[in-house]
Image (cartoon, rainbow, N blue to C red):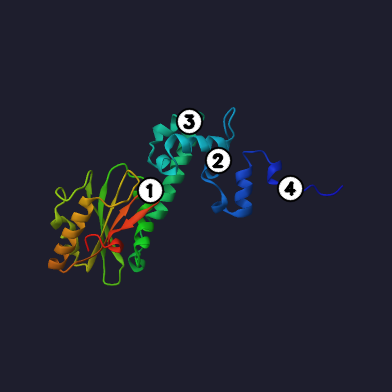
C-alpha cells in the first residue's frame, strides 16, 4: 500500500500549531497558534487555538495579555493556575530577552530611532502608566545606562528639566536620549511632549550634553521627535 500523505489537516486541531512550527518556524504562526502551543490543550467546546483567540479578544491582543495580571489570566475560562503561569512565564522570558543587559564590553549601540525603539518597545508598550526614561550615551552612541525618571502623567510643568541631566552630568556622558510611552497606544507627540523636548534640547546645549532624540513609544509603533523636527 502506498505511503499515506502526511498532512497538517490530518492532525488533531490542537497538534497543528506544533507541526506548523516544526515545518515553517515560529514566525509563520499566528498569535493564537503560538498561545495554543503554550496552552497545549483546549477546553470542552474549544480547541487550544480557539482558546488562544478568545484570550486575545478578551485582553485586547498580546499587549493586553502582557499587561494582565496573573490573577486576571487565571480567571479566564479553562485556564487555571498552571496555564496562566505558563503564559506569564513565556511573556516574561520575552521581556527579559528584549531588555537583556549587555556586558560592559558589548554595550548596545543605537544608530537610528528604530534601534532605540526596538530595545525598549516590548516592555514599554505594555506599561499602563507613562514612564520617562533617559538613555545615557557615550561618544560612540553606545548606551552606558538607562534611567527611569518619572512615572505617571507627564507634562512640561511636572518634569524638572535639570533632572533630565543630573545622572548624565554625574557620569560625564556625551549625550542622552529621552524615551517615554503613551499607554493609549498612540505615539503621536502631544504639545507637552514637544515643549519638554524643546526645553531639554536648549538646556543640553548649556550643559554640553547633546539631546540626540526624544522617542515616544506606542503599541507596535513609535515616533522620533528628532526625525519630525519637533523641538529640535
Q: What is the distance, in whole Å, between disc 4 and disc 3 at their CAs? A: 34 Å
Q: How far is disc 3 from disc 1 in space, using C-alphas? A: 28 Å
Marks 2 and 3 close (CB-CB < 8 Å): no
Precedes in sequence: disc 1 or disc 2? 2
Of all residues, the one furthest to the right in this rendering is 1
Please state the horizontal and vertical placement of residue 202, each as a whole percent of the image: 15, 63
Within the image, what quadrant is residue 100 found in? Answer: bottom left
Q: Is residue 166 above or below residue 142?
A: above
Tell me which residue sits at (34%, 60%) in the image: 116
Residue at mark 4: 6
The answer to whether marks 1 and 4 mark residues whose Cβ atoms lie closer than 8 Å is: no
* Within-10-Å neighbours for mark 2: few <14, some 14–19, many 20+: many
Using the image, tell me which numbered label, if any, was put on residue 36. 2
Bin the neighbour count of mark 4 within 10 Å (Cα to Cα): few under 14, some 14-19, many 20 and up. Answer: few
Marks 1 and 4, how far apart at CA: 40 Å
Name the foreground residue: 77 vs 223: 223
Q: Nearer the viewer, mark 1 or mark 2?
A: 1
Reading the image, the residue beneath label 1 is: 219
Q: Secondary structure at mark 3?
A: helix
Q: Nearer the viewer, mark 2 or mark 3?
A: 2
Badge 2 or badge 3: first in the primary sequence: 2
The crowding category of the residue bearing disc 1, from other C-alpha atoms within 10 Å (few below 14, some 14 to 19, many at least 20), is some
Label 3 or label 1, whichever lies nearer to me, is 1
Instruction: Classify residue 14 by image quadrant.
Output: top right
Which residue bears the numbered disc 3? Answer: 80
C-alpha distance separating marks 2 and 3: 15 Å
Quarter of the image where one finds residue 137: bottom left
Mark 1 vs mark 4: in front: 1
Q: Determine whether 217 is above or below 67 in the image.
A: below
Would residue 156 be found to the left or right of residue 103 on screen?
left
Mark 1 vs 4, N-terminal side: 4
Amino acid at each position: 500500500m502506498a505511503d499515506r500523505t502526511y498532512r497538517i489537516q490530518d492532525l488533531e486541531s490542537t497538534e497543528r500549531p506544533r507541526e506548523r512550527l516544526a515545518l515553517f518556524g515560529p514566525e509563520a504562526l499566528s498569535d493564537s497558534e503560538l498561545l495554543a502551543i503554550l496552552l497545549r490543550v483546549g477546553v470542552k467546546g474549544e480547541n487550544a487555538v480557539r482558546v488562544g483567540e478568545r484570550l486575545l479578544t478578551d485582553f485586547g491582543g498580546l499587549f493586553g495579555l502582557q499587561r494582565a495580571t496573573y490573577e486576571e489570566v487565571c480567571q479566564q475560562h479553562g485556564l487555571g493556575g498552571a496555564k496562566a503561569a505558563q503564559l506569564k512565564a513565556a511573556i516574561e522570558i520575552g521581556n527579559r530577552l528584549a531588555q537583556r543587559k549587555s556586558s560592559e564590553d558589548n554595550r548596545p549601540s543605537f544608530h537610528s530611532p528604530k534601534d532605540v525603539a526596538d530595545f525598549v518597545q516590548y516592555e514599554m508598550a505594555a506599561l499602563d502608566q507613562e514612564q520617562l526614561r533617559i538613555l545615557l550615551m557615550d561618544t560612540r552612541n553606545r548606551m552606558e545606562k538607562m534611567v527611569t525618571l518619572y512615572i505617571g502623567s507627564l507634562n512640561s510643568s511636572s518634569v524638572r528639566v535639570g533632572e533630565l541631566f543630573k545622572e548624565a552630568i554625574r557620569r560625564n556622558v556625551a549625550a542622552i536620549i529621552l524615551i517615554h510611552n503613551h499607554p493609549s497606544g498612540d505615539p503621536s507627540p502631544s504639545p507637552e511632549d514637544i515643549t519638554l523636548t524643546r526645553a531639554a534640547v536648549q538646556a543640553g546645549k548649556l550643559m554640553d550634553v547633546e539631546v540626540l532624540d526624544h522617542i515616544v513609544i506606542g503599541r507596535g509603533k513609535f515616533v522620533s521627535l528628532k526625525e519630525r523636527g519637533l523641538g529640535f
